[in-house]
Amino acid sequence: SIGSDKYLHLLACQAIAYIVSKIAATFMNSGWALLSGIFVASVIGVSKELLDWRQTGNKFSWEDICADLGGAIIGAVMIL
């Protein structure tokens, strides 16, 4: 089963990617806007995991990264 943490990662990155892509679409074509949203959301997701990794009792999670990337892709595609 997928833990609720993964859903939170997915939803957070989905929202970030959607907002970034929507704003970027006013300045560039939709392809670049999609990539911008995915990139920004993914960087934020990886950064969060790196911060977790540095905390005592916490760890880096590839599953969280996958949820972040999935959410980023979904959020970016929502602008189409």
Image (cartoon, rainbow, N blue to C red):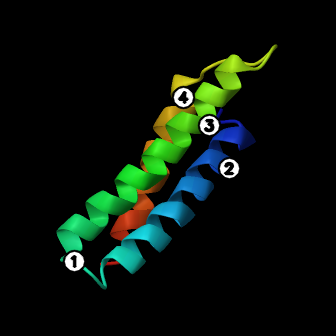
Give the labeled residue for mark 4. 63
Q: Residue 8 — which label?
A: 2
Q: Residue 19 — which label?
A: none
**Between marks 1 and 4 in the image, the one whose residue lies nearer the viewer:** 1
Apparent side of residue 39 relative to residue 28 in the rendered image (left or right): right
For the N terminus, give its image quadrant: top right
Give the labeled residue for mark 1. 28
| CA distance for labels 2 and 4 | 12 Å
Amino acid type at mark 3? Lys
Extreme residue toward the right, this view: 57
Q: Residue 48 — which label?
A: 3
**Between marks 3 and 2 in the image, the one whose residue lies nearer the viewer:** 3
Instruction: For the residues labelled 3 and 4, say whether their Cβ atoms are less than 8 Å apart.
Output: no
The x, y position of residue 36, in whole percent, is 32, 60
As helix, strand or loop, the secondary structure at mark 2 comes to helix
As helix, strand or loop, the secondary structure at mark 3 comes to helix
The x, y position of residue 66, in whole percent, is 47, 36
